[in-house]
Image: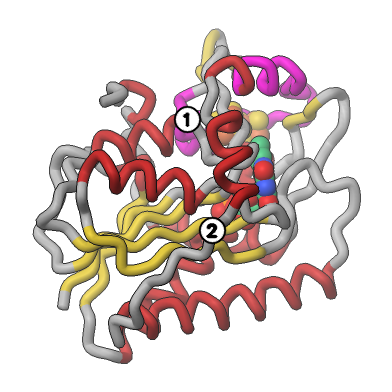
Amino acid sequence: MKVTLYYFSGTGNTQLICNSMKEEFKKANYSVNLIPIENAKPNLLPQADIYGIAFPIAIHTTYPFVRRFIEALPLNEAHSIFALSTMAGTRTGLFNYFLNLQKKRNFQILGLKNIRMPNNYFPKQIIVEENEKRIERGIESAEKFAQDIITREIFKYKKDFLSRLFNPVGNSKWLWTLIKKMYNFKIIEDKCQICQICIKECPTKNFELIENQVLRKNNCELCLRCLALCPNNAIQVNKKSYVIYKRNREQLMANFKEKVILTSSVIDYEHR
Ligand SMILES: Cc1cc2nc3c(=O)[nH]c(=O)nc-3n(C[C@H](O)[C@H](O)[C@H](O)COP(=O)(O)O)c2cc1C
Ligand code: SF4
Ligand code: SF4
């Protein structure tokens, strides 16, 4: 069996969960192709028996560029899919979004799963023990979810009113425009060593180097990858510095070091 698993992870949680699922699938001799969304062209769907999509929940849905990618995938009745989200607490978004998409595309859903992980949403403080527990439980859930897909445990949808209520609001353009205005990112020149990691890794290409200075454009969708990756803590938001949970950050950095850097064009995807 071949699994293609597309994922986006801003600060490492979703990536950790996808790695755990991959290991579980491998135990059942499934081959797994993990593809970061920002490296992929949605119209070039590789041949696979099962397609997975994984992303963080953001504002009761997910980042607009992730939604644009998912909606540009040419999925139809010939495809079996599963989807998972990681989130900090409110399990809204995923279910409603995929069930609506299924109505239009008729793909088969093998499973939908929300997995609670450490909160990366501008954390005021990091409670290591609590985060470690969430990670441990999150990995267990991911392994169980992979097993359910392998054994074709029938997916049953429990009515999720929160998801139905909040998901359409979270998908609306006006809300994202408003939320983006609430957060003022600033690069602190004295701290910035112009390493260009943010320029290379931002999925919406929101940074540019002009006259030896890193500047921000207006494409940010708040995935917080730049905060997680900046080695010098040089990016402030609303005049504060935020530290993303270190275990995730190390995991994320290790992964990025292995890869040749991204060639993102995600913001160009058309809505269908
Ligand atoms: C802008 C933003 C919005 C978020 N909104 C939600 C939300 O509505 N509900 C929730 O449970 N978690 C929310 N979170 C938390 C993330 O979903 C969670 O920490 C996730 O595991 C991060 O995944 P990643 O490390 O793969 O990026 C939000 C995080 C960010 C950055
Ligand atoms: S990642 Fe940080 S240090 Fe590197 S260029 Fe960006 S802001 Fe500067
Ligand atoms: S600027 Fe930072 S937070 Fe905004 S989309 Fe790029 S990496 Fe994510």
Expressed as whole percent of the image width and height from the top left, the position of residue 202 reads 50, 33
**Callout 2: helix, strand or loop?**
loop
Give the number of the mark in front: 2 or 1: 2
Q: Which residues are magenta?
A: 176-205
> Which mark is first along the chain, 1 or 2?
1
Question: Looking at the rendering, which quadrant does residue 72 occupy?
Answer: top left
The mark total stands at 2
Residue 7 is one of the magenta-drawn residues: no
Mark 1 element type: helix
Image x and y of residue 121, in percent: 74, 44
The disc label shown at residue 271, or none = none
Q: Quadrant of the C terminus?
A: top left
Q: Residue at x 71, y 72 (%)?
A: 134
Q: What distance separates the C-alpha of mark 2 from that of mark 1?
A: 25 Å
Label 1, on which residue?
64
Looking at the rendered structure, the kind of residue marked 2 is Lys
Taking 199 as reference, is 226 left or right?
Answer: right
Residue 205's place in the image compared with 77, above or below, is: above
Q: Is residue 230 in view from this perspective?
A: no
In the rendered structure, which amino acid carries the disc numbered 1?
A: Pro
**In the image: residue 128, left or right of residue 96:** right
**Mark 2 lies on residue:** 159
Q: Quadrant of ligand 3?
A: top right
From where the camera sits, is residue 162 visible? yes
If the image is split into quadrants, where does the N terminus sit?
bottom left
**Residue 143, image x and y in percent?**
47, 82
Q: Residues within 10 Å of mark 1 (few under 14, many from 20)?
A: some
